[in-house]
Image (tube, rainbow, N blue to C red):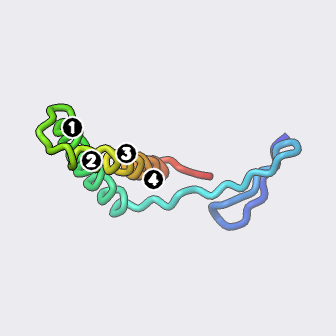
């Protein structure tokens, strides 16, 4: 049996058996959505350029070591941004 208690007009508590869920829907912001989409396009281009440079070995050895680590952190940051974009579109906690 699920019962709901509203905290505000959007967020609410859901009691499901012995579990309590706090539901907070995301704020829909068209401006932030547009900024994130543009940023992710740029992120993807830089990611592809870097991967291509590493695979074709057009770089000096000293720079290759740095780029592998940079690419790892760049990828994590981009994936985090994809999660934020998905949250903006259909997210709720």
Q: Position of residue 49 (x, y in %)?
A: 18, 42
* Residue placed most toward the observer, 5 or 43: 43
Element at label 1: helix
Element at label 4: helix
The numbered mark, 1 or 3, whose residue comes first in the sequence reads 1
Left or right: where 66 falls relative to 55: right
The numbered mark, 2 or 3, whose residue comes first in the sequence reads 2
Q: What's the mark number on residue 54?
A: 1
Disc 2 versus disc 3: distance between alpha carbons? 8 Å
Label 2: how many Cα within 10 Å (few below 14, some 14–19, many 20+): some
The numbered mark, 2 or 1, whose residue comes first in the sequence reads 1
Element at label 3: helix
Q: Are marks 2 and 4 in contact (CB under 8 Å)?
A: no
Picture residue at 58% right of the left edge, 56% below the top: 25
Disc 1 versus disc 3: distance between alpha carbons? 13 Å
In the image, which is nearer the foreground, mark 2 or mark 4?
2
Quarter of the image that includes the N terminus: top right
In the image, which is nearer the foreground, mark 3 or mark 4?
3
Q: What's the mark number on residue 72?
A: 3
Q: Is 12 above or below relative to 44? A: below
Farthest residue in the bottom direction? 8
Disc 2 versus disc 4: distance between alpha carbons? 25 Å
The numbered mark, 4 or 1, whose residue comes first in the sequence reads 1
Farthest residue in the top direction? 55
Q: Position of residue 46 (x, y in %)?
A: 21, 48
Q: What's the mark number on residue 67?
A: 2
């Amino acid at each position: 049996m699920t019962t709901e208690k509203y905290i505000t007009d959007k967020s609410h508590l859901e009691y499901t058996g012995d579990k309590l869920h706090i539901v907070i829907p995301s704020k829909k912001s068209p401006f932030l959505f547009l900024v994130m989409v543009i940023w992710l396009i740029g992120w993807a281009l830089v990611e592809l350029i870097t991967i291509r440079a590493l695979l074709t070995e057009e770089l000096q050895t000293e720079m290759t070591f740095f780029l592998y680590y940079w690419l790892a952190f760049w990828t994590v940051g981009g994936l985090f941004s994809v999660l934020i974009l998905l949250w903006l579109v259909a997210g709720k906690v």
